[in-house]
Amino acid sequence: MLSIKNLTVAYDDTPVLTDVAVNFNAGKITGIIGPNGAGKSTLIKAMLGLIKSKHGTATYNDQPLTAVRQQIAYVEQRKDIDLTFPINVLDVVLTGTYGHLGLFKSPGKAEKQASLAALAQVSLSDFAKRQIGNLSGGQLQRVFVARAIVQAAEIIILDEPFVGIDLQSETAIVQILKQWRDAGKTIIVVHHDLNKVTRYFDELVILNHGIVAAGATTDVYNPTNISQAFSTDLSSVLFDQPEVPQS
Amino acid sequence: MTSIANFIQALTKYEFLQSALMTAIMVGIMSGIIGSFIILRGMSLMGDAISHAVLPGVAIAYILGINILIGASIFGILAALLIGFVAAHSKIKTDTSIGIVFSAFYALGFILISMAESATNLHHILFGNILAVSDSDMLTTAIVLCIVLTFVIFFFKELLITSFDETFARTYGLKTQMMHYALMLVLTLVTVSALQTVGIILVVAMLITPAATAFLWTDRLETMLILAAGIGVITSIAGLYLSYSFNWASGPAIVLVAAALFLIFFVCSPKQAFIRFKRLKTKAVLAHD
């Protein structure tokens, strides 16, 4: 189990997350939802140690998360990637083996085989030699999912993986998520499109600077929690309820 | 005017010209390789800054009579650390921080050099004097080339991943800051070597122009490194020829060759597709008629 305890993060003294405590279970796909600026990506980055937190801990089976880095695969938002970089699809996937290889070892035959297999899993075998700038957004996202496959991690974290991608890619990625879940891995997905929440996620963390609700999607995805985290209007549209006049 | 045949004849005759050629080749290789990483990391300005910032180190090394590599390395790393520190601990962005730190270092170096040595020497440091390379200079350059090649071969995958996707490298526990400063250290060593051929002011051109030329022509990092090194070598040799034949300062001669090569590659590059574009346009016009 991945546990976060009393995590507080602030940017220049403006608190983004205050005393967040939440658990992510193995064998589940957990979605993190919340309005813009709720601290979803911040939560991920703080627990990975990519940004400093004021206090709090992140542990995996009682070990600090930073001590089990090899067990984590993180698929970042795509916007920061340099698409002109002289690297092809296969070589990007190969970088997923770097963490396990350690210093002074180059990827060999076994790593290349694993990368080709991962590319096949996301149906991109024909694109192995393409420079990454020549892919669509969805194809590129699948490349990074293939890299996560190669990492053979126990915890997989994806930040907004479905933004700006085609339906075929989205379906392919959801398939992979389900395979990971069935293999007992811990999967965390930052997500902002509420429409598919019930279809994609077994468990849900509703976030707005703090935890609004967390638990099985069927239990926590309800008008009360959504209106508390987002707005009453959004909640009434989503759940198709007439607005109840406040008395 | 000296023809190429005369140049080759002179090469067989004069030892100073052989030393110059060897040094030019070695500097071409190392600056092409390190320059490739500099441009891929979007650090061209940093490359320029570090190359200027080593000047006080060079001056102090002259004054104290110690190896120029030691003095330059200290100031190169000091500048890199200071640039990082100012950017991290203030609202100031990195490019501004670079501008402040390197100009200050350069100014200090300029004054120290003029205090320590004659004006001729300063001129050589600023613009390069490849025809005056000594045996010990050549040995130093050879050592730096070995360091560069060892560094890039042993840390190839770390250099690749920190240049391409630094966040990813951090998530699997790579010390990306260490890689950055290691690269800055190697960059200062390359700068000191390139100082003999092109001089401090133009080092940046030797770093980024051959690398940029190679970048236009390939989609693979390994190919880019080899191509950049090759272009660096051709540039250096052609520049040396021009410098010897027309008595031009070696720095400007080499840099102009580099720029000319870049221009040719830029116009003909498959990535730019200027030529193809033109043909299509002609066709379109014909079709319109």
Image (cartoon, coloured by chain):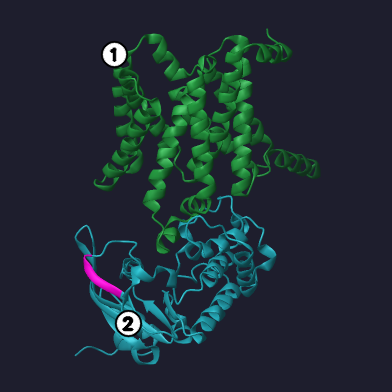
Chain to which mark 1 belongs: B
| Disc 1 target residue | B115
Side (left or right) of B55 relative to B233: left
Is A57 a magenta residue?
yes
Chain A drawn colour:
cyan
Answer above or below: position of A185 versus B35: below
What percent of the width, then of the height, locates residue B272? 64, 42
Q: Nearer the viewer, residue A107 or B288?
A: A107
| Residue with the most extreme top position | B1
Quarter that holds the C terminus of chain B: top right
Quarter location, residue B12: top right
Answer above or below: position of B77 versus B103: below
Q: Secondary structure at mark 2?
A: strand
Amino acid at the residue labelled 2: Asn
Residue at 58 percent of width and 74 percent of height? A167
Amino acid at the residue labelled 1: Met
Q: Nearer the viewer, residue B287 or A44?
A: A44
Quarter that holds the N terminus of chain B: top right
How busy is the neighbourhood of tag 1: few (under 14 within 10 Å), some, or many (20 plus)? few
Q: Which chain is green?
A: B
What count of labels does the image hold?
Answer: 2
Question: Taking the image as drawn, is residue B36 in sight?
Answer: no
| Residue A23: mark in rendering | 2
Residue at 36 percent of width and 39 percent of height? B95
Quarter location, residue A214: bottom left
Side (left or right) of B29 relative to B172: right
Residue at 56 percent of width and 81 percent of height? A175
Marks 2, 1 in one chain:
no
What percent of the width, then of the height, locates residue B246? 61, 10
Residue range in magenta is: A54-58
How busy is the neighbourhood of tag 2: few (under 14 within 10 Å), some, or many (20 plus)? some
